[in-house]
Amino acid sequence: MSADSLRQRLLELRREIARHDYAYYVLNAPIIPDAEYDRLMRELLKIEAGHPEWVTPDSPSQRVGGAPQAGFAEVRHAVPMLSLDNAMGEDELADFDRRVRERLGTDHAVEYNAEPKIDGLAISLRYEDGLLVRAATRGDGERGEDVTANVRTVHAIPLRLMGEGWPKVLEVRGEVYMPRKGLAALNARLARAGEKTFANPRNAAAGSLRQLDSRITATRPLSFFAYGWGEVDGLALPERHSTMLERLREWGLPVNPLNQVVHGLAGAKDYAARILAKRDALDYDIDGAVFKVDRLADQRELGFIARAPRWAVAFKFPPEEELTELLDVEWQVGRTGALTPVARLKPVRVGGVTVSNATLHNMDMIRQKDVRLGDTVIVRRAGDVIPEIVGSVPERRPPHARAITAPAACPVCGSHVEQVEGEAVARCTGGLYCPAQRREAIRHFASRRAMDIDGLGEKLIAQLDEAGLVKRLDDLYRLKLADIAALERMGEKSAQNLLEAIEKSKHTTLARFLYALGIREVGEATAQNLARHFGTLESIMDASIEQLMNVPDVGPIVAEHIKDFFAEPHNREVIAGLLAAGIHWDSPAHRAGEQPLAGKTYVITGVLTGLTREEAKARLEALGAKVTDSVSKKTSALIAGESAGSKLAKAQALGIPVLDQTQFEALLAGR
Ligand code: IVH
């Protein structure tokens, strides 16, 4: 290839990769499979290796990080980076709104641009002629640190602005953050490597961005939301803050999709309530909502006091982290015998609820976080996870603080506790001899998403267990009215209700039954996949490891657990007992006539004529097939309608059969 056409190819690759970065990291809608992306990247790297003089800072190859720096240079912000005044509670929000209206001399509702307050690290990105030239931390607001090399590794941040109409100089302000899932994966990786883990996403984001070695930053799952701007040269600003954010979005910058213009105090309160309700379900931490007067002319009129604008406020949500005292540690025995250290705490309000217990996960975590009895500890309750201790405050350690040790014997049954090599957890070896394991197994079996035995809760299970009435799961189905009624605080009526609930549970589904058995690592989704794939309990019980591994989501470890479970004669006896007691489910064939597509998995993409995707899905499912959203090597075939995109490419790359509309109709018709 001539140097000219090689260079053309290089530029083409850069544009192509930037487009895929945008689709993947900003829109969360990848266009091509990872393997294809890697191929483009390798081609680019190869060309650049042959022509180092062609490497430019906006090349996607520069996202992998470079040689470590000695330190960070200082950057003076052309426009200072301000902070926000806080409003704690609705009264203070009302005060803010009143002050704004007084200063603007209006009785009307003010329009605010409402945004989530992202819990990360403020950053300023400087684009000159559309090219990212510098990134700096906030520092003291006047001067920050030059973290350009690190910021280049954040894929959600464009190295070159997209679209058109951007000004000669554009400073974008926003928050670098680490998604919760990313933090969990990072911490797991750090823990495996025996390194220190991060207590929360903010620390992780800050720690990652302040790495002197940008190659390390490149391995950290950081992301970014733009929420404002600093210096802008060569553009007449629009009339509204919300319009400018819209521009930023058009230029390829990620802007939070929850941003919204709201009317007046009532609109702001309503927005805050909605965002708070969503808080746990988001993939990133937020610590409040930010309200900004939307009209820029009004912003200018309102101006600033000290370090914060008068036109914006941060409405703070209840904190997700608090300090409290660790009073004691108790060891809870789970269904599989795993011993979990549970911290007993001096009660404290976190994230809007009072917390007096929190998990310490396992012995490794306790050591790693250096937590001792009597310590002041940081409790965190974020997302829908159970409260956890994320660290201690050694400076506040009292002299009487004592080390935490795992018990040598099970606190419930006294059996020997074993620590499996390479596993962080300690396990009680008592099996079903251990009341805790037995009771947990029953509780799981009876739970709503398993056999759904209404009214069979923890207390009642303990009573039944103490009375020796339920030694095995199938004993539940042999309970007599008189036995139950004789229990303390149990009348004839409640006993009758329980018997009815037990009776009702006999009619179930194969998936629920499998899940209820409590096989290690077989959750609801895996149970459903197993049921769909095999169709009958017998075939699952007799399946080989290889056959089990053909099921979506089932890897070698899960397959091993399933095989081990059914190899255990005791388990087979219990299952036989349960079936003999009358537990049954409709066989798939029974339910919808024939099920010729049982065990098959399809993905639907593109536009089908004459039926919606939902209808297509329903038709396939009626024939026993499973329909999923993403193509994997376990997909039986891809149904591709008009203008199919990335899924088609992925199916082709994986060599998965593709059916067009005609072939799909033939499939439905059984031809
Ligand atoms: S606006 C002039 N908007 O909160 C206003 N800040 O206490 C400058 N933050 O340093 C900030 N989400 O790190 C703004 N949607 C948002 C934000 C946000 C998070 C952070 C930012 C800032 C701090 C202010």
Image (cartoon, rainbow, N blue to C red):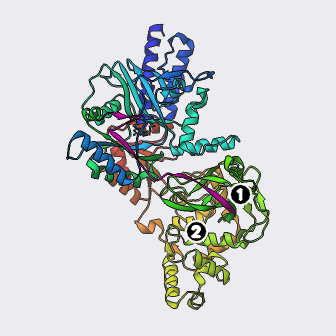
> Where does residue 415 sit, x and y in percent of width and height?
78, 68
Q: Residue at x 61, y 26 (%)?
A: 212
Q: Residue at x 55, y 72 (%)?
A: 446
Position above or below: 641 against 549: above
Is 176 on the left-hand or right-hand side of 91?
right
Quarter of image, res 540 = bottom right
Q: Is residue 325 visible?
A: yes
Name the secondary structure under disc 1: loop
The residue type indicated by label 2 comes to: His
Position above or below: 175 against 170: below
Q: Residue at x 37, y 17 (%)?
A: 129
Disc 1 target residue: 373
Count the numbered circles shown. Answer: 2
Disc 2 target residue: 444
Position above or below: 346 against 153: below
Measure the C-alpha gap from mark 1 to mark 2. Answer: 32 Å
Is 13 on the left-hand or right-hand side of 109?
right
Region in magenta: 302-329
Crowdedness of circle 1 by 10 Å Cα count: few (<14), some, many (20+)? many
Name the secondary structure under disc 2: helix
Asked if labels 2 and 1 touch by Cβ distance under 8 angstroms, the answer is no
The residue type indicated by label 1 comes to: Leu
Ligand 1's image quarter is top left
